[in-house]
Amino acid sequence: MDWLVIGLRIIHIFSAVIWAGGTALFFFYLEPTIAKLGPDAEKFTDEVVNKRKAPIYFLMASTFTVLGGALLYWHDSSGLSLDWIGTATGLGFTVGGIAGILAWLGSNLLIPRTLMQLGAIGAQMKGDGPPAPDLVARLQATQERLHTIGLIDIVLIGIAVLGMATARYLG
């Protein structure tokens, strides 16, 4: 029995469930709420991003997922053997792995930066009277960017999950 592989699979699967579930919760429920609240979302966004440290949560879950998956891929492919990678199983894991890595990049580079921009715009909109039209336009554009990044991230995570869940049964 290979305890290292078992441990890596547990880490990979557990952190992937946390990452995928948290991402779905964020983009199907929290992001639309942030968009709906507009400038009033600044306190909520500040709480989630700065006080509750959601970006760190996603960074840790996604990084454990990708690192565990990379080590498992290395193990299963016998050190990146092209003979294994070219099999149906190898291709399933390869497609899933690439999708996971791309989702990791979006989750950890683009989303936190966009959330910080939303918070900054929301803070600028606070004050007497209605917000300036250019700030409203910037807020809407940033919310749309967050939504687009989130949809791409959800699709990539879905491809990764499907690739990982089915790869062993393809060949």
Image: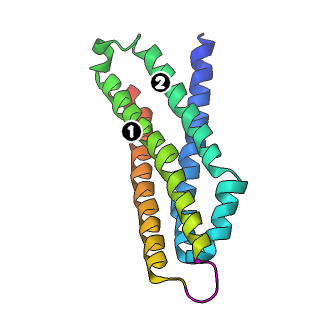
Residue 96 x %, y %: 39, 34
Magenta segment range?
A: 125-130
> At x 46% / y 60%, what residue is drawn?
146
Chain-order first, disc 2 or disc 1: 2
Residue 47 x %, y %: 70, 61
User: Which label was assigned to residue 41?
Assistant: none
> At x 40% / y 26%, what residue is drawn?
168
Amino acid type at circle 2 is Ala
- In the displayed structure, 63 sits above or below 118; it is above
Q: Nearer the viewer, residue 10 or 122?
A: 122
Label 2, on which residue?
70
Q: Quadrant of the N terminus?
A: top right
Taking the image as shown, residue 44 lies to the left or right of residue 152, namely right
- In the displayed structure, 45 sits above or below 55; it is below
State the predominant SS element of the stretch in magenta. Answer: loop
Is residue 127 shown in magenta? yes
Q: Are marks 2 and 1 in contact (CB under 8 Å)?
A: no
